[in-house]
Amino acid sequence: MKIKTIEEVLPILGFNGNVLVSDNLDLTIGLKLHLPEVLTCSGEKIALLHDTFHRVVNLLPAGSLMHKQDFFMADKFRCNLKSNGNRAESLTDSYLQHFEGRSYLRHECYLYISILNRGQLKNYLSSSLIFSKRERNSLELQYDKIRELQANLTSLFSQSGIGCAPLTREEAAGDDHTTGLIERFLTLNFQGGEPILGGIDFRDRLKVMDRFVEILSLSDYSHVPGEVRPTGAHPQTGLPVSLVYPVTWNLPFSHVTNQFICVPGQQEVKASLEDQCHID
């Protein structure tokens, strides 16, 4: 069996500050979002959240990619009350003890924005081994562009009442004592903490450590309903929920959802439409 290390497979060149740089010189930033709890929002509030992400897409420059990733981790509720014989039991304590040991989904949400490389690597390889001043200035402009975009997105989320914190290099890649987000995703280590030793096996079925993995994708627009709305109804209570509820909170096991939106350049779209016109 042919074995490769993670370093050989992952298209990650390294980090420049908190900006991830890929092998193709794509630049990526990450944001950790704190969204409202499920079943706590009215239909109007969910519509406002949907409008916020619509404005986020409008802020993206041409040649960029937005990736929203949600971790849903099956866990048991622990109230962690400290015993104190001198303190009378409060209503809050009774409320927490009522849910002690119950199963629930712990949620983490991350948003990644990538500015895709458009000839930067080709220009570098065709030039001298040392970046020319022109190429260095072009790369610096890209870094300034993505940092400005990060500041604008943070401001937009804060104004909309969504908690937002930039992802640091340590949170993404980890350190000697904690596992990073990349390692947690690759090893399906939903609990965090200590690293898990093992590998990813592609023989017969995809197996990560001791878990078999199922991957489902929806990429063809013909599979999407002809009409969608930002809000739906909870199947049991009828309370307003997001349109993606069936594949997020409604699944009672640990899973990860990924949503991608690519913003191509106008010239690319024009060339694609012209090619389709010639084919037709």
Image: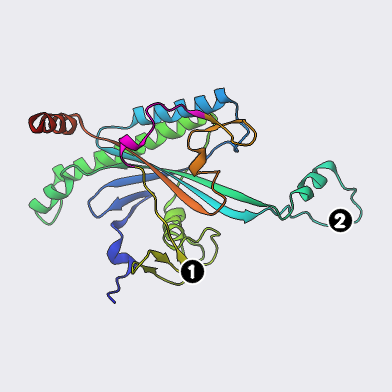
On-image quarter of the N terminus: bottom left
Q: Viewed as shown, does residue 227 lie left or right of 35?
A: left
Magenta segment, prevailing SS (helix, strand or loop): loop
Name the residue: 74% across, 53% down.
Answer: 100
The magenta segment: 219-231
Name the residue: 42% across, 33% down.
Answer: 153
> What is the three-letter code of the residue carrying label 2?
Asn
Q: How many dots with numbers?
A: 2
Secondary structure of the residue carrying tag 1 is loop
State the image coordinates of residue 82 (x, y, percent, origin top left): 79, 56
Identify the mark at residue 112; answer none if there is no mark: none
- Verify whether residue 98 appears in magenta: no
- 263 or 136, nearer to the observer: 263
Instruction: Name the residue beneath numbered marker 2.
Output: 84
Instruction: Name the residue beneath numbered marker 1.
Output: 196
Name the residue: 55% across, 43% down.
Answer: 249
- 28 or 249, nearer to the observer: 249
Secondary structure of the residue carrying tag 2 is loop
Name the residue: 74% across, 49% down.
Answer: 99
State the image coordinates of residue 151 (x, y, percent, origin top left): 41, 34
